[in-house]
Amino acid sequence: MQHIRASDGIRIAVDVHEGASGQPRLALIHSLAMDHAFWAPVVERLTAEAAIVAIDARGHGASDKPLGPYTAERMAADLADVLDALGWPAAVVAGASMGGCLALQFAADYPERTQGLGLVDTTAWYGPEAPKDWAARGERARSQGLASMIDFQRTRWFSDEFQSAHPEVVARCVETFVLNDVEAFDATCNMLGRFDGRASLAGIRVPTAVIVGEQDYAAPVAMAEALRDGIAGAQLTVIPGARHLTPLETPDVVVGELRRLLQMAA
């Protein structure tokens, strides 16, 4: 891990896997309350094929945790600052859940730097009740603690079958979740409640993969279909039986779609 200072002075932690000369580049943004390790199954499958950077978003992991409010624009700029520091003029950008919102924001704000777009278990808009609902989630973390939310999170993150078969993966996610800074979690929840990237969809002109678990209750298939319908040429993959954290539950499917984007970028 290393730290890169964003243009506003905040340090962003990054996990960089340097590829061979001429290989395509992939930037990854994790889901809410996770960190760069969220992408480990994807990175280990693609590390021979691409240069990869997985960041800890501001307020998460080993990155700085400034006071809010947070904005999607600022968090997308963090990734742009990371790419600048790495000397990467452009990359395929992929994000899951919260990270997908930020990847979408990045593609809208930095189209010339986006060679492909992976939108995993995510949405352009959480709906009219989102500001209230996300604020309530942040407030619950503040008043009751993150540990109070674990049972709810487990059922959303993974299918029952996966939880039974891979308790170690679930345990790592739980450990990461409860270690989050509550103030930063609250600020991020409110950012997601305000997020609305619908107006940017028609302007995206890069190869786009939309991926969602069939049983995703957090960002349901209908939200993925709206992304597919709004972005010209986007391809939608619905993963049978999977829930919200498909890069961990079904990494081979996610890798297949990201590999296609990398090949197009190359």
Image (cartoon, helix red, strand yellow):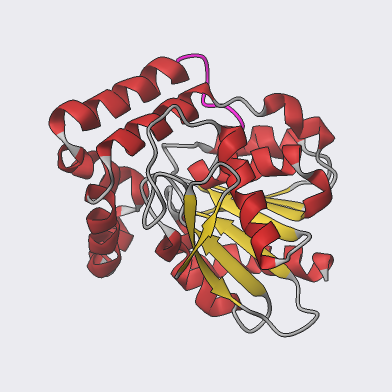
Question: Is residue 194 rendered to the left or right of residue 35?
Answer: right
Position of the C terminus, as image quadrant, is bottom right
Along the viewing direction, whichever of 249 and 188 lies nearer the viewer: 188
Q: Is residue 55 visible?
A: yes
Q: Is residue 115 above or below residue 234?
A: below
Q: Percent from the top left, x then y, of residue 231? A: 78, 38
Q: Percent from the top left, x then y, of residue 116? A: 76, 55
Q: Is residue 203 above or below residue 260?
A: above
Count of numbered circles in the view: 0
Q: Percent from the top left, x then y, of residue 62? A: 37, 58
Identify the image quadrant of residue 35. Answer: bottom left
Along the viewing direction, whichever of 76 and 46 lies nearer the viewer: 76
What residue appears at the point 51 percent right and 78 percent down from the top-left corner? 44
Question: Is residue 1 rendered to the left or right of residue 4?
Answer: left
Position of the N terminus, as image quadrant, is bottom left
What residue appears at the point 78 percent right and 60 percent down from the top-left corner? 89
Q: Is residue 132 above or below residue 118?
A: above
Specify the farthest residue to the front: 9
Find the magenta span and give its range.
123-129
Whether the magenta-drawn stretch holds residue 103 is answered as no
